[in-house]
Image (cartoon, grey):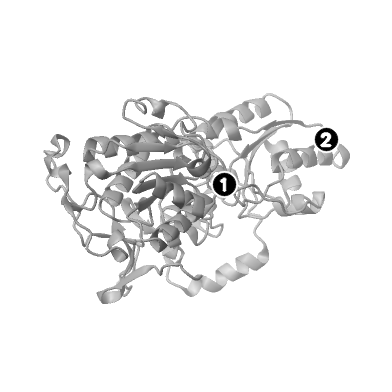
Amino acid sequence: MAGVSQMKIVNGVAGYVLEDVPHLTDYIPHLPTYPNQLQDNPAYAGVKQYFVNVDDTVAQKIVVHNSSPRGTHFRRAGPRQKVYFKSDEVRACIVTCGGLCPGLNTVIREIVCGLYHMYGVTKVLGIDGGYRGFYAKNTINLTPKVVDDIHKRGGTILGTSRGGHDTSKIVDSIQDRGINQVYIIGGDGTQKGAAVIYEEIRRRSLNVAVAGIPKTIDNDIPVIDRSFGFDTAVEEAQRAINAAHVEAGSFENGVGIVKLMGRHSGFIAMHATLASRDVDCCLIPESPFYLEGKGGLFEFIKRRLKENGHMVIVVAEGAGQDLLAKYLKSMNQQDASGNNLLQDVGLWISHQINDHFARVQKMAITLKYIDPTYMIRAVPGNASDNVYCSLLAQSAVHGAMAGYTGFTVGPVNGRHSYIPFERINERQNQVVITDRMWARLLSSTNQPSFISPRVVAESKKNQHKPPTQLLHGDRCENNH
C-alpha cells in the first residue's frame, strides 16, 4: 500500500528477530531528549532499577526445542532513561471507540493519573464520542480529580461511537489543538484506524506520538495474552449460566440457553463454560455444528434430557451463522465499524429446538432463553481487570513519553510489550478446535465435537510434527 511505512525488523544471532515499533526520530531526526523525572519521583525511591534496558525484548514463543531459532521478539514496555517530551509541553488526548467493555474508565483514569503523577503532565483532553469527536464535538479537560472514581462505573465517561473515521479531519484537529500524544482505546477496527492516523501524522512529519490500548471483550486481539474486560465478562457470564441452570433444573425436560459475546471468536463462551461446569453444550463460531441427523445437536439434546432431565446450552453470538443465513437467506450487512451484522442465533436456535421437539419428537420441553450481552458489557471491571488496565495505561504512557509511536501495548507471555500496529491488525485470534483447551471443554460437557471427518484427517496428517507444534501460534496460554 502506497505511503505506508514498513515495519522495523531487526535481525540478530541464532534466528533472533525483533519486530520493533516506530520512533519519532525515525522521521524527525535530532529531537532533543530530557532526563526521565521518574528517578526523582518519591513513589519510585525504593525501586532498584528505574528504567527498562534499551535492549530488553520479550519473546513471542516461550515453548521451544533445543534446535529452535530464538524467534520473534517485541520491545519490552516500561520507562526509559531519556524522554522526548518536556512535561509542561505535553498536550495529550484520550479517545474511546467502538462497543463498551468493562475496564474502559479504569484505562482512562490511569492514563490521566500516570501522566500527572509520574511525568507532571497537566494538559490532558478527553475526546467526546469516539473518532468523530475530534472534529464534531468539544473536548473534556481531564484531571486526577475529574477521573478519581470513574473506575467504579461501567461504560466510558468520554462516550463512544462506531465509524466516523475521517483521517484528514482527525489529524487536522490534532494539529490545530497542539496535541502531541494521542491515546486510542478500542478494538481491532479502532486499532486499524489508529494505524492510519499514525501514518498520516508521519506523512506530515508531526511530533506526535500515537499509542493504542487494545480493547475487545471477545479476546480476539492477536499476539497479546488477553484483552482487558475479558476476565470480567467471563465472571459476569456465570450469573446468566447459573440462572439458566436453575430455570432448566426446575422443570421437567428444561432447557436453558444463554447467548454470550463472541462475533468471530468463542473465548468467552469457552471459558465461561469451563468455569461454570453446569453447561452441557457450548457452541462457538470456530466449531461448525449441525442440528439434525446422527451426531447432531437435536440428538444430543434428546439424549441429555433422558439422562439428566434438563440441560444448559451456551452459544456465542457468532456461532451457527452459516445455518442461520441459509434459513433466513439473509444478505451480508455491516455496521458503521465495518463489522458484519449478525442474526440473533440464540432466538433462532431456541425456535428450532422448540419446533423440533414439538413437531418431530412429540416431546414437551420447557425452554428459557437468556441474553445478558449488554448487561455484561456495561459493568465496571473486576479486581483482576482493574489491575491489568492500570498496567496497560502506564505502559502506554511510558512508551509515548519515550518517543515511541505507532504501537499497541499488551502482555506477551506475561511481560508487557510494545507491538507494531501491523501485527495487531493482521488477523483476529480464534479458538483452535483441534487444541487441548477445546478438548478440555469437550471432556467437561461430554458434548459431540461436531468436527467433520475431513478436519480430523487433516489433524492426523500433522501428527508426525514435534509435539509442541500447536504452540507455534501467537498465544501459548490455551495449550497448557
**Circles 1 and 2 in contact, beta carbons < 8 Å:** no
- Please tell me which residue lies in front, 242 or 463: 242
Q: Which amino acid does label 1 sit on?
A: Gly
How far across and how far down the image is residue 7, in percent? Answer: 39, 67
The numbered mark at residue 363 is: 2
Rendered residue at 23%/42% (across/down): 87
Q: Answer whether residue 145 is visible to the viewer in this image.
A: yes
Q: What residue type is labelled 2?
A: Met
Decide: few, some or many residues near mark 1? Use Cα within 10 Å; few <14, some 14-19, many ≥20.
some
Residue occupied by mark 1 = 164
**Secondary structure of residue under mark 2:** loop
> How many numbered marks have been drawn onto this rendered protein structure?
2
Decide: few, some or many residues near mark 2? Use Cα within 10 Å; few <14, some 14-19, many ≥20.
few
How far across and how far down the image is residue 80, in percent? Answer: 20, 52
How far across and how far down the image is residue 298, in percent? Answer: 76, 45
Looking at the picture, does residue 47 appear above or below residue 467?
Answer: above
How far across and how far down the image is residue 426, in percent? Answer: 50, 62
Q: Answer whether residue 474 is visible to the viewer in this image.
A: no
Q: Quadrant of residue 114?
A: top left
Judge left or right: residue 84 versus residue 18: left
Rendered residue at 75%/47% (across/down): 299
**Secondary structure of residue under mark 1:** loop
Q: Quadrant of residue 46?
A: top left
Which image quarter holds the C terminus?
A: bottom left
